[in-house]
Amino acid sequence: QVQLVESGGGLVQPGGSLRLSCAASRSIFSTYAMDWYRQAPGKPREWVATITTGGRTNYADSVKGRFTISTDNAKNTLYLRMNSLKPEDTAVYSCNAHTSILGVAYDYWGQGTQVTVSS
């Protein structure tokens, strides 16, 4: 079992920055790939970024060049650094951990943190 707890959301002006955190209950980054997703009101959940167990990263086109996903193994924490924020980035951001071990899929979600970009 893995617990994930996000933090760092809030209200920020357009062009501003935020760093989201996702604290895992134990060391998982060598076994689980990690993702950030977001969901805006009235819209489906949208994938934002991935970091693999090998440290490779991938981003949605809508955030490429503005957002950076990273991990701190010593702190068991996943981050999402968000720069040049736009009103359309407003959403609830959630982290996800997923892996497959001996054919069994494991998938865990945090509770989400609200990001609002508005002047």
Image (cartoon, helix red, strand yellow):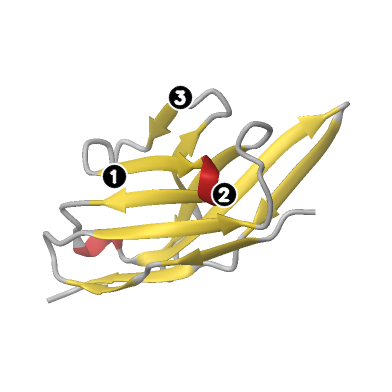
- The three-letter amino acid code for the residue at tag 3 is Arg
Q: Secondary structure at mark 3?
A: loop
The quadrant of the image that shows the N terminus is bottom right
Give yes or no for contact between labels 3 and 2 (Cβ–Cβ under 8 Å): no
Above or below for 40 versus 28: below
- The three-letter amino acid code for the residue at tag 2 is Asn
Density class for disc 3 (Cα within 10 Å; few <14, some 14-19, many ≥20) is few
Q: Secondary structure at mark 2?
A: loop
Would you identify the image quadrant in which residue 110 lies?
Answer: bottom right
Closer to viewer: mark 1 or mark 2: 2
Density class for disc 1 (Cα within 10 Å; few <14, some 14-19, many ≥20) is many
The mark total stands at 3
**Mark 3 lies on residue:** 56
Q: Is residue 44 visible?
A: no
Separation (CA) of disc 3 from disc 2: 17 Å
Residue 53 lies, in percent from the top left, at 58, 28
Front residue of 49/73: it is 73
Above or below for 79 versus 98: below
**Mark 1 lies on residue:** 67
Residue 112 lies, in percent from the top left, at 52, 67
x 68%, y 51%: residue: 26
Front residue of 80/45: it is 80
x 53%, y 41%: residue: 73
- The three-letter amino acid code for the residue at tag 1 is Phe
Left or right, 68 with respect to 45, comes to left
x 69%, y 60%: residue: 3
Left or right, 69 with respect to 101, comes to left
Closer to viewer: mark 3 or mark 2: 2
Left or right, 28 with respect to 87, comes to right
**Mark 2 lies on residue:** 76
x 49%, y 48%: residue: 78
Front residue of 50/22: it is 22
